[in-house]
Image: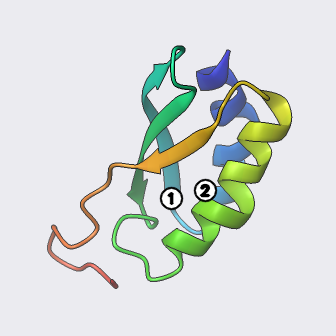
């Protein structure tokens, strides 16, 4: 359900900047959702703000059991990170 929500509700907004979000793992015991940002979001200096203000808010509003959204992206890797 979380993956479908990301695909239908979050990724269309991120796609306007060439980015996307992937759910890597959700731990039902702790409520931690581990996500990876890609495309234009990978290495973007605004990715932290996007994660906190848009992504975390949307996921927790839809899935109250989510206690934390953890970005596992290595934003410094790659050929052209903005970070």
**Vertical side of 2 occupied by 16: above or below:** below
- Left or right? Give the position of 11 relative to 80: right
Determine which quarter of the picture holds residue 10.
Answer: top right
Secondary structure category for the residue under label 2: helix
Query: Which residue is located at x 52 percent, y 71 percent?
Result: 48
Q: Residues within 10 Å of mark 2 (few under 14, many from 20)?
A: some
Query: Which residue is located at x 73 percent, y 59 percent?
Result: 54
- Is label 1 in contact with label 2 (beta carbons under 8 Å)? yes
Quarter of the picture holding the N terminus: top right
- For label 2, the residue is 15
**Vertical side of 46 occupied by 51: above or below:** above
Q: Residue furthest front?
A: 30
Secondary structure category for the residue under label 1: strand
Q: In front here: 18 or 56?
A: 56
Residue 20 visible to the viewer: yes
**Vertical side of 83 occupied by 12: above or below:** above
As drawn, the label of residue 69 is: none
Q: Residues within 10 Å of mark 1 (few under 14, many from 20)?
A: some
Q: Residue furthest right?
A: 61
What's the coloring here? rainbow
**Vertical side of 49 occupied by 39: above or below:** above
Query: Which residue is located at x 62 percent, y 67 percent?
Result: 50
Q: How many marks?
A: 2
Could you tell me residue 78's position as x and y percent? 16, 68
Query: Which residue is located at x 76 percent, y 39 percent?
Result: 60
Could you tell me residue 4's position as x and y percent? 66, 22
Quarter of the picture holding the C terminus: bottom left
- For label 1, the residue is 19
Residue 16 visible to the viewer: no
Q: In front here: 26 or 10?
A: 26
């Amino acid at each position: 359900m979380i993956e479908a929500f990301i695909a239908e509700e979050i990724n269309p907004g991120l796609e306007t900047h060439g980015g996307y979000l992937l759910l890597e793992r959700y731990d039902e015991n702790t409520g931690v959702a581990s996500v990876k940002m890609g495309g234009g979001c990978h290495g973007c200096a605004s990715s932290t703000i996007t994660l906190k203000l848009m992504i975390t808010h949307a996921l927790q509003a839809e899935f109250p059991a989510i206690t934390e959204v953890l970005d596992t992206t290595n934003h410094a890797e790659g050929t052209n990170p903005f970070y």
